[in-house]
Image (spheres, rainbow, N blue to C red):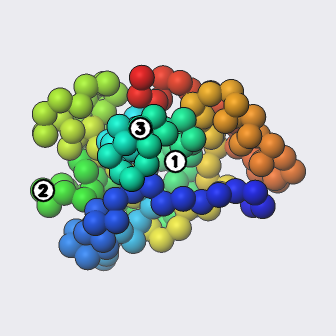
Amino acid sequence: MAGVIHEKIGYAHIKERRMTQYRVPCCGNRFVGEFVPFYYCPRSPMLFTINKGNAAKPAGCQTDIIHLVSNVGRAIEVGPTWAISDGNAGAGYTSFDNTLVALASLEWDIIHSNNWAGEVRRNKKSAEFLVADFFPWQGIDTVACHNSQIADRVSKLLTGQVQAPNVVVRTDWYYQ
């Protein structure tokens, strides 16, 4: 899309580790970094780190970051190879499964809470849905924004798109 600025916002060393160290056994033993990751909750740990100014970005910069939202059913339709992690997919003790039964074993009370205290809790809250290789734009059904100014900018960028997702303001998906 013309006028869209793409910026890498994650730590390079974590991305490298996901490409070289951690594998998804249920999907041909591919590296975690070969998958497009989705959290089940907003306010990811990386968003927290970025907003605190700990990732070579100024403190408070989360307002320019948008959430691309899909759902498990849609993700399975567009991505034939997928996996569910029971925690942070970039941790050495995380388990993976590629059956929907795995969704029932996730710690949903932790995933939906605002509490990140404790390493076990942080890991469980960071559970991911992983789609191999690529996630098409048509799989996104919502773009959640920090405020109405960002939502207006996103809406203008999406003008004329055949399958434009809904654009919403969700301040509760960001850190205060």
- Residue 115: which quarter of the image? top left
Asked whether, in this view, residue 152 is left or right of residue 77, the answer is right
At numbered mark 1, what does the secondary structure look like: helix, strand or loop?
helix
Q: Earlier in the sequence, mark 3 or mark 1?
A: 3
* Mark nearer the N terminus (2 vs 1): 1
Residue in view at x 27 percent, y 38 percent:
125
Q: Secondary structure at mark 2?
A: loop
State the separation of the CA atoms marked 2 and 3: 31 Å
Q: Label 1 sits on what residue type?
A: Gly
Q: Image check: 21 left or right of 36?
A: left
**Residue pointed to by mark 2:** 93
Disc nearest the viewer among 2 and 3: 3
Q: Quadrant of the C terminus?
A: top left
Closest to the observer, 32 or 2:
2
Please tell me which residue is depicted at 25% across the width and 51% down the height of the picture: 88
Q: What is the x, y in percent for residue 171?
A: 53, 24
Q: Is residue 138 or residue 114 the one in the foreground?
A: 114
The residues tagged by marks 3 and 1 sit, at their Cα atoms, a distance apart of 36 Å
Q: CA distance from mark 2 to mark 1?
A: 27 Å
User: Residue 53's x, y, as percent?
Assistant: 37, 42
Front position in the image: 136 or 9: 9
Q: Secondary structure at mark 3?
A: loop
Residue 59 image label: 3
Looking at the rendered image, the disc whose residue lies closer to the viewer, 3 or 1, is: 3
Badge 2 or badge 3: first in the primary sequence: 3
Quarter residue 47 falls in: top left
Label 2 vs label 1, nearer the camera: 2
| Mark 3: amino acid | Ala
2 and 3 marks in contact (CB < 8 Å): no
Do residues under tags 3 and 1 come within 8 Å of each other at their CB atoms?
no
Mark 1 — residue?
Answer: 73
Give the quarter of the image for residue 28: bottom left
